[in-house]
Image: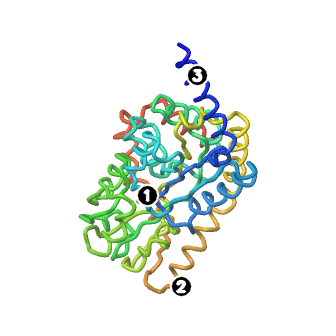
């Protein structure tokens, strides 16, 4: 008994001593933030901004390590890594949430769903956006914010001006059934590829065309192997910033509150740079001289809209009638 009591006392003294000198005691909380795009994109720049704000606002108690360009994980792997706690923060595109079993996010991929950025923000910043993020909680994920990229363009090695121009074209898409249906409605052959593989697949002819925002295309050098680009604005690409729930809930309350503030500021900053970054990227593509840029006439736009309308009916059961109706009502207000 006595020996046991002594051992307990010794262990307590040793650990108290270790605590006093432990370099770990001053070690910052590390947030690994993994993403798949280049640093000079709306998401890449906002991730860096969040890092700066979080580190500064917590006086260095939190360190944010940003890993861009799939340097840690590719699309699907990063979601698994987040759930396992190998990374703490991600911002996957809203098209990539269905492997988690939350298909409602694919509503954001519906063709022409958002007539403007204002309509988009009404959804993401309102009740619908908040309810969607809440659906991630049972998956061990907390949704913190929506980040913006922009409206998508189409690219290929031939002009894409009318739906008939897509016939038989192998088009790279993100892993979303709505995007699959969209490409099929245009007569193309969709192929799901991780973002990290898209540029090389275009170069090697594995796929013949793609859709993305100008900033994603330019920073991956996709324009170098795509001779035509159509500013179609036919769909939207945006993100949800998400964290591992257990990690987030386990943070000291004051640190979590400070990080929430840093995230609010980074999100506000993100909104101011998304459009500008994409406009600049489109100009850089034009300047590179590799790619002819097409604008659609009003008549061509009507033709695209008509061709893509059936996607709504096809996807209703998958996404859910209620959420589709709620978004449609919100964007028309
Ligand atoms: C894509 O896969 O094309 C995009 O989701 C990449 C991104 O994160 O913007």
Residue behind mark 1: 72
Q: Is residue 21 above or below residue 155?
A: above
Is residue 286 shown to the viewer in this render?
yes
Q: Is residue 309 above or below residue 269?
A: above
Q: Position of residue 53 (x, y in %)?
A: 71, 54
Residue 74 percent location from the top left of the image: 39, 56
Mark 2 CB lies closer than 8 A to ligand 1: no
Give the labeled residue for mark 2: 287
Local crowd size for mark 3, using a 10 Å CA cut-off: few (<14), some (14–19), many (≥20): few
Distance from disc 2 to disc 1, alpha carbons, whole Å, reads 32 Å
Q: Dot 3 lies on which element?
A: helix
Percent x, y of residue 165:
32, 68
Quadrant in the rendering for residue 250: top right
Q: Disc 3 designates what residue?
A: 6
Q: Earlier in the sequence, mark 1 or mark 3?
A: 3
Q: Nearer the viewer, mark 1 or mark 3?
A: 3
The residue closer to the viewer here, 170 or 119, is 170
Q: Nearer the viewer, mark 3 or mark 2?
A: 3
């Amino acid at each position: 008994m006595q020996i046991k009591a002594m051992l307990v006392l010794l262990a307590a003294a040793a650990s108290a001593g270790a605590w006093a000198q432990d370099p770990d005691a001053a070690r910052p909380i590390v947030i690994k933030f993994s993403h798949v795009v280049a640093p000079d994109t709306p998401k890449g720049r906002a991730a860096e901004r969040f890092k700066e704000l979080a580190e500064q606002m917590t006086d260095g108690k939190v360190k944010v390590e940003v890993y861009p360009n799939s340097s840690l994980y590719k699309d699907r792997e990063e979601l698994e890594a987040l759930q396992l706690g190998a990374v703490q923060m991600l911002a996957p595109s809203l098209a990539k949430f269905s492997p988690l079993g939350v298909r409602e996010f694919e509503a954001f991929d519906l063709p022409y769903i958002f007539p403007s950025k204002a309509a988009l923000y009404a959804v993401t910043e309102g009740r619908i956006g908040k309810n969607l993020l809440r659906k991630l909680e049972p998956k061990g994920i907390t949704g913190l914010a929506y980040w913006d990229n922009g409206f998508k363009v189409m690219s290929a090695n031939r002009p894409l001006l009318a739906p008939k121009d897509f016939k038989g074209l192998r088009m790279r898409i993100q892993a979303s059934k709505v995007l699959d249906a969209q490409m099929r409605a245009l007569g193309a052959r969709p192929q799901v590829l991780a973002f990290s593989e898209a540029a090389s697949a275009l170069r090697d002819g594995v796929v013949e065309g793609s859709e993305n925002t100008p900033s994603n295309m330019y920073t991956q050098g996709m324009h170098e192997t795509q001779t035509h680009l159509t500013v179609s604005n036919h769909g939207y690409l945006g993100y949800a910033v998400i964290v591992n729930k257990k990690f987030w809930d386990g943070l000291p309350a004051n640190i979590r509150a400070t990080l929430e503030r840093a995230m609010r500021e980074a999100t506000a900053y993100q909104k101011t740079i998304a459009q500008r970054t994409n406009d600049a990227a489109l100009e850089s593509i034009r300047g590179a001289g590799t790619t002819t840029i097409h604008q659609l006439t009003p008549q061509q736009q009507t033709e695209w809209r008509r061709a893509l309308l059936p996607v709504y009916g096809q996807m209703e059961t998958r996404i859910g009638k209620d959420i589709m109706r709620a978004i449609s009502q919100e964007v028309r207000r």
